[in-house]
């Protein structure tokens, strides 16, 4: 079977549709997305194997998913640390950060230092569909050929380089940060050669997933059959009450165990 | 150990605090509350034992939790039917109802007819802390001695009577509808003698839980240690990624299996 994916353009349209005809609020969607990510981390790396998790959050929606995941991980008895150097002024993100402050979750500015002391990393720096910076990059890539490294400001290139070089397992949210939605791993810049351990695709895998060969989960158990049909998605069946389902990295179909 | 509970007054204050200093939005809290309820239903009655679930929703927050639970139950492969005779004009509840419409979940006005055709019922008619009608009732109870049945309009008294008389298992959300937060089962009115099969207390058990002897779950895995301390809660440890924990109905402590 073909590896079905959602194009960059369709991913943006689907996200908009979830919040218009779908009637979801961004609070709801982000809560469920972050919950999915936390369940994938638990599956990959239960707290019995080491409780320290470093969550790297970018300034957009991908970072918001990371903030939600960090909260759930705290409740699962992990010891999360959050790297969130460019904190959004957006009211929702501010609230998500306050929720972590209320749990005593530490925020660090020293990503490389924190990496040395962690058992697992969540890469929620850049995602796909709703990440404004990414959309601009995608636009720029297609129309001007600008490279990734030329547009993303520090400290993110340094963080992506550190993610590439670390031996700690990395789970990327929706996309390995710096990867192109359509074309996958970049051929230049700090993300060249960055292959995370695991990927949690949200709503549906994007074309970049075809270039990814690690463990692949799908999250976002909220898509209606009508939307799935409209966007020509073949969503796998989730089991029980799981908010994630593991996919075969080769085919994008549900992994047969 | 004493069965620790959260008084009616404290429950209202705690809910307010979650949304002020706690920085949660009602969307987030309701999503997590409804998710807890859906997980309790799955634990009590997995879809392999019968997929038809009837969710009875009142006009307030308790009903909103029920609408969220219905959506998750649909995604778990149940066939939910929703009884929601007094639909709130509140934007959030309207969106939650639209989310169910988008999944093709049927809404019925015939509660007693729907009861004949279901395997499990969720009672999300009246809750405790954030239910305006309930708060009024609580106020009225304490200051005027008005009875429950005198204040709640049809069709809810008839629905509560049907819940009392049905042989189908009933899971109540936060409170068995018509029970007094402090004093438990009413001594008159349609709810007299209504004992549901299971109760999902949200955030913390209320005093009414001491009068309840069925299976008892706690949901709402989002309370910070600071808030727990302020309200003198002894919250049990949740397991793994569970959004619910089963309590011993006699002691309110985590059930030892």
Image: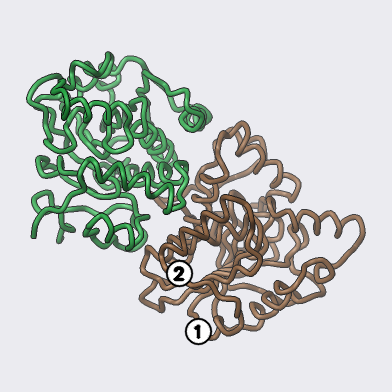
Chain colours: A brown, B green
Find residue A27 and report its horizontal and vertical position in percent: 53, 46
Find residue A56 and report its horizontal and vertical position in percent: 59, 69
Q: Which residue is mark 1?
A: A117
In the image shown, does A257 or B83 lie closer to the viewer? B83
How far separated are the C-alphas under marks 1 and 2? 15 Å
Let me know if residue A255 appears in the view.
Answer: no
Image quarter (top left, top right, bottom left or bottom right) of the C terminus of chain A: bottom left
Q: Vertically, is B163 above or below A237?
A: above
Residue drawn at (63%, 43%) of the image: A233
Residue drawn at (23%, 57%) of the image: B233
In the image shown, does A49 or A115 lie closer to the viewer? A115
Secondary structure under the numbered disc 2 in the rendered image: loop
Figure disc tally: 2
Residue drawn at (67%, 62%) of the image: A126
Chain of the residue where label 1 is placed in the rendered structure: A
The numbered dot on residue A6 is: none
Find residue B118 and report its horizontal and vertical position in percent: 28, 27
Q: Which residue is mark 2?
A: A105
Q: Is residue A180 left or right of residue A21?
A: right
* Same chain check for tags 1 and 2: yes
The answer to whether the residues at label 1 and label 2 have Cβ atoms under 8 Å apart is no
Q: Count residues near mark 2 (Cα–Cα under 10 Å), then give few for <14, some for 14-19, many for 20+.
A: some
Find residue A182 and report its horizontal and vertical position in percent: 76, 57
């Amino acid at each position: 079977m073909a590896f079905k994916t959602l194009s960059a353009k369709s991913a943006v349209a689907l996200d908009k549709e979830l919040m218009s005809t779908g009637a979801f609020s961004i609070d709801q969607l982000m809560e469920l997305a972050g919950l999915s990510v936390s369940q994938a981390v638990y599956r990959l790396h239960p707290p019995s194997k080491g409780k320290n998790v470093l969550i790297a959050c970018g300034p957009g929606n991908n970072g918001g998913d990371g903030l939600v995941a960090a909260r759930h991980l705290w409740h699962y008895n992990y010891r999360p640390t959050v790297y969130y150097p460019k904190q959004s002024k957006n009211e929702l993100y501010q609230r998500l950060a306050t929720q972590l402050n209320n749990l005593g979750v530490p925020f660090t500015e020293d990503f490389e230092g924190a990496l040395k002391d962690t058992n697992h990393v969540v890469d929620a720096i850049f995602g796909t569909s709703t990440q404004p910076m990414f959309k601009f990059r995608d636009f720029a890539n297609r129309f001007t050929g600008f490279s990734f490294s030329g547009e993303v400001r520090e400290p993110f290139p340094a963080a992506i380089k550190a993610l590439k070089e670390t031996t700690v397992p990395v789970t990327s949210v929706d996309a390995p940060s710096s990867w192109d939605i359509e074309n996958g791993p970049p051929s230049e810049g700090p993300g060249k050669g960055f292959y995370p351990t695991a990927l949690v695709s949200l709503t549906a895998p994007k074309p970049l997933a075809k270039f990814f060969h690690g463990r692949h989960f799908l999250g976002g158990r909220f898509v209606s059959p009508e939307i799935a049909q409209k966007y020509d998605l073949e969503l796998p069946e989730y089991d029980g009450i799981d908010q994630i389902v593991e996919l075969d990295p080769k085919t994008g179909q549900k992994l047969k165990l």
